[in-house]
Amino acid sequence: MEPRAAAASALAKVIRQGRSLASVLPVAVNQVETRNAGLVQELCYGSARWYPQLQRLLAQLLVRPLKAKDSDIKAALIIGLYQLIYTRVPDHAAISASVNATRQLKKDWASKLVNGVLRRFQRERDALMAALADDPEYRLAHPAWMIDAIDAAWPQQAAAIFTANNDHPPFTLRANTRRVTVSQLQQQLRDADIACTPTPFSDSGVTLARALDVNELPGFQAGQVSVQDEAAQLAAGLLLLQPGQRVLDACCAPGGKTGHILEREPALEHLVGVDLEARRLQRVSDNLERLQLQAELICGDATQPQQWWQGPPFDRILLDAPCSATGVIRRHPDIKLLRNSADIAKLAQLQLRLLQALWPLLAPGGMLVYATCSIMPAENTEVIEQFLSACSCARHHVIDAPWGLAQPFGRQLLPRAAGHDGFYYARLQKAGAAEKTGLQQ
């Protein structure tokens, strides 16, 4: 299949069916020649990144909106506009390929429409863009509800957040310090002509000047290094791990934090990783196998721990809760299409249920670290506040760190251009016998 037709088919599933790019891209990539796989991915991710803006332009160009059943033609037009604005593909080639895509999508009737719309944009580009200059969705390339929510939560930082969200994400590695130091990893990368710099907050991280295929990374197959954003690398350190502890990693897929916990404290008594989906749990298993690490992996619902755990309590729990993922939009730009304002309250309810369900599994004196990749206070500090107000045996354990912004409870990292993703962490301790680790109640 021609790459634009494959990309349009994939993007249409996101637009109409609410499916994620991660779930539809593998099919699209398999429909094209190997050499075109990267182009399909770029067209889909780039079009999703700028979708709110491109959609506003398209609305000006269409005499009447397309029917829902023609979401693939809408996607082809969005992809055509993306190429004309944001890529170095010559205009004539972008238009011609977009027209050809309609035929491969078996909608020959749309070829004149696509040709006419894209050629009109080519002629009237400056005027069309100028007419939308004051439109927030066009200017910021975010849906209106998200613009309002970010402006309300982070008025001083909103502009920087929008910029970071529209940027390409940095490519950051985590050294497996059981096998290689950060300094040794840096030297290996430089020897391979790969420019890199150490991360400012994670003591295990290195950020590359450009993204690479993981198979090009020195030591990747040998388990010396993993790909993980700096913000996510902070989780293992916040657990204050000690030898002999029992640790639960809840909602653990794809396993980056699971591996980091085992790398950071090799003398744990036991680590259990639980996730709802068997398919995602397989990724955890694959990652641990590459790192030559072991954990007990359980496919189960973290809101129903009685169904999968009758063992002794845990000294540490990491709850990496399902969330809106508004802190990682640059990695998953389809979030702009998939999320809506009602999702935030629903997710906050789920996050609170998870905390309430897992708390009984924590030993007295033990610690739970709550994490999300959201920047919405309703999913973060407000969830923790609600939990603490109802749980008399839970104590907020202050995170004293040089990163992020202190919140009423926990700390919030906001996405930084060329830096870490958006992430939230809070630490809670359970009242009871003081631990030998020196934690205070």
Image (cartoon, helix red, strand yellow):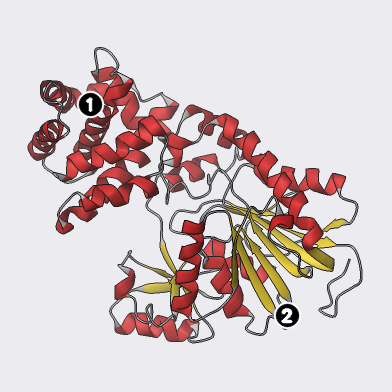
Query: Which residue is label 2 attached to?
Result: 242
Q: Earlier in the sequence, mark 1 or mark 2?
A: 1
What residue is rendered at 46% in x and 31% in y?
143
**Other residues around mark 1 within 10 Å, as few (<14) / some (14–19) / many (≥20):** few
**Other residues around mark 2 within 10 Å, as few (<14) / some (14–19) / many (≥20):** some
Q: Amino acid at mark 2?
A: Gln
**Helix, strand or loop at mark 2:** loop
Q: Is residue 56 above or below residue 303?
A: above
The answer to which of 172 and 283 lies nearer the viewer is 283
Of the 4 image quadrants, the one containing the C terminus is bottom right
What residue is rendered at 13% in x and 38% in y?
94
Query: Which residue is label 1 attached to?
Result: 126
What residue is rendered at 37% in x and 30% in y?
16
The answer to which of 13 and 320 lies nearer the viewer is 13
Q: Is label 1 in contact with label 2 (beta carbons under 8 Å)? A: no
Disc 1 to disc 2, C-alpha distance: 61 Å
Q: Is residue 387 above or below residue 142?
A: below
Of the 4 image quadrants, the one containing the N terminus is top left
Q: On the image, which quarter does residue 369 sit in?
A: bottom right
Q: Is residue 298 left or right of residue 133?
A: right
Q: Is residue 250 above or below residue 351?
A: below
**Helix, strand or loop at mark 1:** helix
Q: On the image, which quarter does residue 379 sit in?
A: top right
- Observer able to see residue 340: yes
Q: On the image, which quarter does residue 227 sit in?
A: bottom left
Q: Nearer the viewer, mark 1 or mark 2?
A: 2
The answer to which of 161 and 389 lies nearer the viewer is 389
Residue 421, percent from left and from top: 51, 55
Residue 68, percent from left and from top: 33, 22
Q: Is residue 237 above or below residue 167?
A: below
Residue 429, percent from left and from top: 82, 62
